[in-house]
Amino acid sequence: MKTPDPKRPSPGSDILRTALRRNVGAMAKGTGLMGLYQAAETAFPIALGLIVEHTMQDRGLGALGLSIAALAVIITTVSLSWRFGMRTLQKANTTEAHRWRVRVAECGLQPVARDVDLKSGEVLTIATEDADQTADIIEVVPLLISSLVAVLVAAVALGLADLRLGLLVIAGTVAILSVLAVMSKRIGASTREQQARVARAGAKVADLITGLRPLHGFGGNHAAFLSYRKVSSDAKRQAVTVARVNGAYAGTALALNAVLAGAVTLAAGWLAFGGQISIGELVMAVGLAQFIIEPLKLFSEMPKYVMMARASADRMALVLSAPPLTTPGPERPAAGGGLEVDCVVHGSLNRLKFTVPAGEFVAIAVYQPRAAADLASILAVNVPPHAYEGVVRVSGQALPDLSIEAVREHMLVNPYDGEIFAGTLRTNIDPSGTGGLIPEAVEASMLTDVVALHRDGLDYAVRDRGANLSGGQRQRLSLARALATDSEILVLHDPTTAVDAVTEQLIARNVAKLRRGRTTVVITSSPALLDAADRVLVLDEGVVVAEDTHRNLLATDEDYRLAVTR
């Protein structure tokens, strides 16, 4: 058995440390360039002060040309360092966000669900917004350091002119950050709550989209929409709260920065008026006082972004650190084997026991739909083996001993509500692009009329969830995808419930022909599929109560005849 990955990040702080550690090179480069940018920006008012100071002594053309050249070098440095520094950081940020999206998606797509109380819509929000905000830490740290460089350079320059000016900048910066650090904690708490409410609204939307047709069927759509309106309103109110807190934070930061800049300007003017600093140093001080607002603003905003990144990382940790409900084994099933269900007890299944030898086509007629769903879930490994009694064997090997990937390659369970993805008919039938049994699968599933209906054929564009296809077309497209895999064992759950009787008859014959010599199990009440099978198992109250061919059961079993004849 596999052991859990000890390197898997758990708390949000570990996720942030992982992001910082694997981007240390890009961050070092970005920090250097952004530090150079801030230093050059700071050097501009310093250079102006020096130019004024020396121009008053030497008013020749040579001094003017040298001054213009110096300013040109500073401006060029500012432009290039900003351009390449931000390019480096944003590339690293985007790449890191993609890595976390893939990680979250990988966890969300695991066949055996993780023990975490999150819906699919919430996982989607975590994989998008939270991944992006977590990766922002890649830009936050270099910008924080570069802003600190600018403040320190300004403080040193002012301190060289007069120590009191330098101390004023340092003391003011410490005071501003102390006030804003307290406010940033409020932002972090509000952001966590907002992200949770937005995720709940996203989950509600996903549920509504999935169940819209049934809701319309029994008139429950109005109540569902009211339910969504409630969670959406909660998310909106929290977003307004976060915006209000962010606005107060930004306003306070701007006001404090302006107060500090004004204090430096007034102090420099007073010192110049008293003759304690020169006119050139006054120009430098006034220029730095105006310039310092921008790095101070950037510097004071960084705690807010750190708290937002931490809140998002904590939400990602809910998915990434949650252990799987089961730990799959390392083995692979042998080729050409059959399927065995041995005394399985789960949900409505009551010590269910049957065997499907390799190469046989078996249909299972289930009287209770719940039992069919339970059986399909177990075979699809959507239920962890420790959650039910008994054992399922694939090619003679128990499921707990097999890796999930190996089971997926060997046995495909196609649900009755298989997803249709945005793309084309071809990409839905052959998502991996291997070009397998596409023509055969299209013909066997009777999808030929859909392909012929459109000028683009298999390249006809399909909308998300097959919105531009009928229910029967979606079902046949899902069946074609299952048949095209040509897996060793194929389990189909009600593959023809949305098609007419004539099409169903043709599909049953085609599936039996295409899957000849391959192990096939169909959970169905369709007379056509039952008749095409080599053998029919009758499942009632969770156990097999009869076993024979379809026609023999029709002749000898009254309950079976009433259940499957239409």
Image: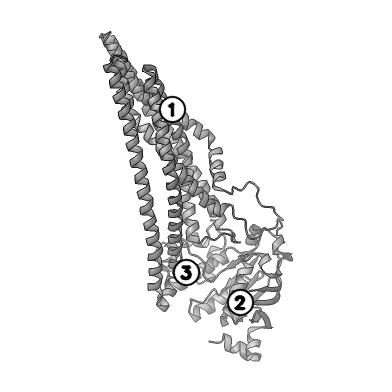
Question: Looking at the image, is 362 positioned above or below residue 198?
Answer: below
Provide residue 115's location: percent of width, then percent of height. Answer: 59, 60
Type of amino acid at the residue the image marks with label 2: Ala
Residue 371: which disc? 2
The Cα–Cα distance between marks 2 and 1, rounded to whole angstroms, is 67 Å
Q: Residue placed farthest to the right in the image?
A: 396
Relative to 172, is 279 on the left or the right? Answer: left
Which of pointers 3 and 1 lies earlier in the amino acid sequence?
Answer: 1
Type of amino acid at the residue the image marks with label 3: Arg
Question: Looking at the image, is 322 positioned above or below residue 266?
Answer: below
Circle 1 SS class: helix
Q: In the image, what residue occupies the spot 29% across and 25% down?
A: 266
- Mark 3 and mark 1 in contact? Answer it, CB < 8 Å: no
Mark 2: give few (<14), some (14-19) or many (20+) Cα within 10 Å: many
User: Where is residue 406, by image quadrant?
Assistant: bottom right
Q: Is residue 386 visible?
A: yes
- Mark 2 and mark 3 in contact? Answer it, CB < 8 Å: no
For disc 1, the marked residue is 149
Q: Nearer the viewer, residue 100 or 417?
A: 100
